[in-house]
């Protein structure tokens, strides 16, 4: 008498699958995804570091190239590769010049002289524009500051302003001056030693030594005193 056989048993589930309700495959996929994200993140970090090193090398090469183009240049001259310098043979710069971002130095048939230890933040424009700008030692200039030694003529009403040419002047910035962000220095102004120019000021007249000026137009708002 032959015995009846039931249907063949199917493949048995693994203990891990039984314990987790069949979630092994999704868990492994999630682990693979996390590993890939980690690899991509590490690659991005390395690529960023490499780009910074290459950028620093490019800035150094640019600085060396501009240094030999200038009328004269001291030691430790540094500008970024995105800086713009026009008429460099009319520009003289002392030691330890540091531009912390793109800067714009224009002689434009004028004369630009910068002393030792000048520090310029990004987007500073110093434009002799046919006039003369002289900056002393240890001067600090914050972002977006403009110094321009000429203005458009506006006195003739029978012709467009664009056709009247320029009135050229001189700007002098003495030693140990700090010009804060977004300030504008107009022609025929002297910033005396130790002057602080407040952010956003428009300086239209010369200052006294060791004063703080601010506003539009700028006026004296404080006097510096004391010693450290």
Image (spheres, rainbow, N blue to C red):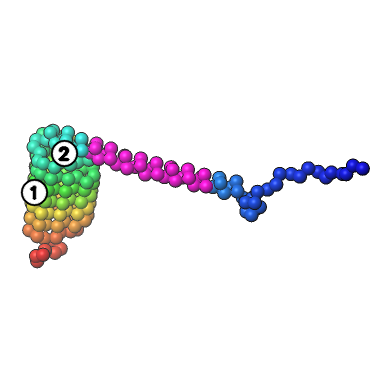
What secondary structure is found at the residue carrying circle 1? loop
Q: Position of residue 200 (x, y in %)?
A: 22, 54
Above or below, 173 relative to 56: below
Which residues are the magenta region? 31-59
Query: What residue appears at the point 21 percent right and 56 percent down from the top-left corner?
Result: 199
Residue 32 visible within the image = yes
Q: Position of residue 195 (x, y in %)?
A: 11, 57
Total number of numbered discs in the rendering: 2
Outermost residue on the bottom side: it is: 226
Magenta region includes residue 37: yes
User: Which one is in front, 151 or 210?
Assistant: 210
Can you identify the residue that label 2 sits on?
A: 106
Badge 2: residue crowd in 10 Å (few <14, some 14–19, many ≥20): many
Q: How much space separates mark 1 and mark 2, taking CA atoms?
A: 17 Å
User: Which one is in front, 194 or 37?
Assistant: 37
Outermost residue on the right side: it is: 1
Badge 1: residue crowd in 10 Å (few <14, some 14–19, many ≥20): some
Residue 21, numbered circle: none
Magenta region includes residue 218: no
Asked if residue 28 lies left or right of residue 189, the reply is right
Question: Which is the main secondary structure of the residues drawn in magenta?
Answer: helix
Asked if residue 38 lies left or right of residue 27, the reply is left
Query: What residue appears at the point 9 percent right and 46 percent down from the top-left corner?
Result: 115
Can you identify the residue that label 1 sits on?
A: 136
What secondary structure is found at the residue carrying circle 2? strand
Name the quarter where the N terminus is drawn: top right
Asked if residue 188 lies left or right of residue 63, the reply is left
Query: What residue appears at the point 17 percent right and 45 percent down from the top-left corner?
Result: 98
């Amino acid at each position: 008498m032959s015995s009846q056989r039931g249907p063949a048993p199917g493949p048995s589930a693994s203990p891990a699958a039984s314990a987790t309700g069949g979630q092994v495959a999704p868990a492994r996929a999630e682990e693979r995804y996390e590993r890939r994200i980690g690899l991509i993140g590490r690659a991005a970090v390395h690529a960023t570091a490499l780009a910074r090193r290459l950028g620093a090398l490019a800035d150094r090469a640019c600085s060396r190239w501009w240094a030999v183009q200038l009328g004269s240049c001291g030691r430790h001259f540094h500008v970024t590769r995105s800086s713009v310098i026009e008429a460099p043979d009319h520009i003289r710069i002392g030691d330890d010049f540091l531009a912390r971002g793109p800067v714009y130095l224009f002689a434009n048939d004028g004369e630009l002289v910068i002393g030792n230890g000048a520090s310029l933040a990004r987007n500073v424009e110093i434009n002799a524009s046919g006039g003369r700008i002289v900056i002393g030692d240890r001067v600090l200039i914050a972002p977006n500051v403009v110094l321009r030694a000429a203005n458009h003529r506006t006195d003739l009403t029978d012709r467009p302003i664009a056709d009247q040419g320029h009135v050229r002047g001189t700007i002098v910035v003495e030693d140990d001056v700090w010009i804060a962000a977004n300030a504008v220095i107009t022609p025929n102004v002297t910033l005396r030693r130790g002057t602080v120019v407040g952010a956003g000021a428009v300086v239209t007249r010369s200052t006294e030594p060791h004063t703080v000026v601010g506003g539009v137009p700028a006026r004296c708002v404080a006097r510096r005193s004391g010693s450290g």
